[in-house]
Amino acid sequence: MSESDPIKVLLIEDDDRLARLTARYLESHGLVVTVSADGRAGLAEALRSPPDVVLLDLMLPGLSGMEVCRQLREKSDVPIVMVTALGEEADKVLGLEGGADDYLPKPFSSRELLARVRAQSRRARGRSGPGAERVHVGPLSIDAGSHAARLDGKLLPLTSAEFALLVALARRPGRVLSRDQLIELTKGSADEAFDRSIDVSISRLRQKLGDDPKNPRFLKTVRGVGYLLADDG
């Protein structure tokens, strides 16, 4: 897929008016939008014709947004932006733990939504950093251009948010990065980031690296400061 290809978005939203307005705005900026008003149908569409980004409402008929996210994440690493009227931090964390890459509460700015969709698409297409960059940290090998990370030669099934976090840490092995630094390094758009999003992504990344959370080999916590990727893993 080239940089000139339009971004394909699957919008799973049961509010017909909001779906039409959102789709119209995104399409006016060159994106290609498919709309599904039902959770089960939206999941089937995402698997049948994978988009670049999924915009997923939490409250859906047929299948809840959280369940759509969980099932989709089991089979795909497509970027998922959760869009919902629920705006409490606990709900954001729940969505991120379910596999979402980002979270946008209603009502939202159309310009902010567009910025987030573009940011997620850039990461998924491997354009968040220098295209040819490859980073090696111990048994970890990361190719920013192809959006691939391997541990002992085995491909890691990372979401775009997890990959961006790993790249940020791998570019600075052995250096402690605060949550604010990681938010700045991994977001790069008008995101409404918050500390717990980093904690959740670190937890998910540790699971995929096979790290023991009490005595991690790779991703270490420096209490009160932040996280680092050990350079002697």
Image (spheres, grey):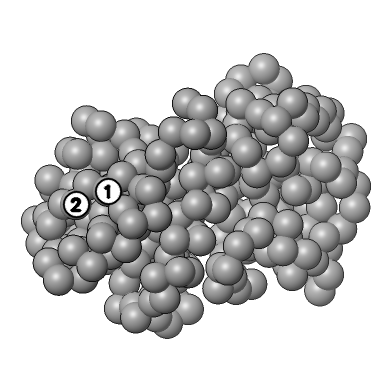
What quarter of the picture does the C terminus occupy? top right
Question: Quick check: can you spot residue 207?
Answer: no
Residue type pointed to by label 1? Val
Q: Is residue 210 above or below residue 11?
A: above
In the image, residue 100 lies at what x, y percent?
43, 55
Q: Which mark is residue 86?
A: none
The residue carrying pointer 1 sits among few (fewer than 14), some (14 to 19) or many (20 or more) residues within 10 Å by Cα, namely many
Q: Name which residue lies at 68% across and 64% down.
A: 183
In the image, residue 31 lies at what x, y percent?
36, 48
Q: Name which residue lies at 31% across and 34% down.
A: 50
Residue under label 1, please give it. Answer: 33
Q: Is residue 139 above or below residue 216?
A: above
In the image, residue 42 lies at what x, y percent?
18, 47
State left or right for residue 232 relative to residue 25.
Answer: right
Q: Contact (CB < 8 A) between labels 2 and 1?
A: yes
In this rendered view, identify the residue nearer to me: 213 or 192. 192
In this rendered view, identify the residue nearer to me: 47 or 122. 122
Question: Quick check: can you spot residue 61?
Answer: yes
Total numbered labels:
2
Residue under label 2, please give it. Answer: 35
How far is disc 2 from disc 1 in space, using C-alphas? Answer: 6 Å
In this rendered view, identify the residue nearer to me: 85 or 29. 29
The residue carrying pointer 2 sits among few (fewer than 14), some (14 to 19) or many (20 or more) residues within 10 Å by Cα, namely some
| Element assignment for label 2 | strand
Task: Using the rendered view, name the quadrant where residue 158 is placed.
Answer: top right
Q: Residue furthest top?
A: 153
In the image, residue 98 lies at what x, y percent?
40, 55
Residue type pointed to by label 2? Val
